[in-house]
Amino acid sequence: MRWLLITGTHTSTSDPSSPKQWASNPLQSFGEIFDLVFDARSGPGPFPYHCEFYPTMRDTIFAAAECAATGDVNGDGLSLTAEDQTNLAAFVYGEEAPPILCYEADLNGNCAIDEGDVEMFALYFEQGIGVFELYPVPTCCFPDTIRGACCASDTCTIRAQKNCPNIGGEWYRGDGRFCMPGYACDCCENVRGNMDNDPDDKANISDASFLLTYLFGIPSGPAPYCLLEADCNADGKLNVSDVCILICYLFSIWPSSCECGPCPW
């Protein structure tokens, strides 16, 4: 981006809300310029800015960078290696942090990092580079990911970590696939079953009673604070099966086949 002075004295100064911060020296002579580089790490914006001498002179920059995925997921300079495949799968299934450059992992070019990209890696190793119509694969520079929640107040939006500032997010927290308004992100930790939100995070018989009251009480009881904690069998539903699994787990009725699932999965 280049600013060229025509007349007067001006600066190009980023607003505090801009995800990229800059401040030029005063431009005072006709033809004087100020250059600023926006790259993939800058984010898509918006980047609002103003003149320090004339605050009403304002504008906003929106980046439109183009990126392409090469499959260098682990950032070692080598593309489409077995290590890249392992790292991508570990990220998608919740075991590792996102790639340093997320777009490198978007092998199907759909602006998301998900199971489809893992499948593309598998096809590559089975059939070779011919599985890609275009290589490197064109994609957006800031793909969303299936993991992670950009949170503001009590709501979460599933975004890549670097996109948080651009949607007004205040912090980035773990696996937020099931975040929803009114429920905490990252509320499920260790083993599921703490349905009544005990501070010690331990499952006990009061949790079974809490869920039964919620499901069948007249009147019904309060909803679990964390839906993932209450979904003891991790099937995405809250029903009497979760109560049965919890009781089975607490009393070791069938210890080899009855256990609350881990969090997050």
Image: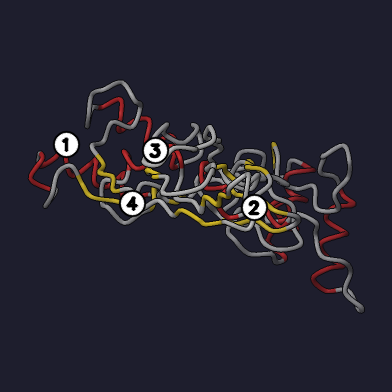
Q: Residue at x 57, y 42 (%)?
A: 13
Q: Residue at x 80, y 47 (%)?
A: 194
- Residue 33's disc is 3
Q: Position of residue 217 (x, y in %)?
A: 88, 74
- Residue 197's disc is none
Q: Position of residue 231 (x, y in %)?
A: 68, 56
Graded by Cα atoms within 10 Å as few (under 14), some (14 to 19) or many (20 or more), the crowding at tag 2 reads few
In the current view of this chain or complex, which residue is farthest to the top?
Answer: 76
In the current view of this chain or complex, which residue is farthest to the bottom?
Answer: 218
Residue under circle 2? 55
The answer to whether marks 3 and 2 mark residues whose Cβ atoms lie closer than 8 Å is no
Residue 77, picture quadrant: top left
- Quadrant into which the C terminus falls: top right
Q: Position of residue 40 (x, y in %)?
A: 38, 40
Residue under circle 1? 125
At mark 1, the secondary structure is: helix
Query: How far apart are the alpha carbons under marks 3 and 2?
Result: 19 Å
- Quadrant into which the N terminus falls: top left
Left or right, residue 70 beside residue 36: left
Graded by Cα atoms within 10 Å as few (under 14), some (14 to 19) or many (20 or more), the crowding at tag 3 reads some
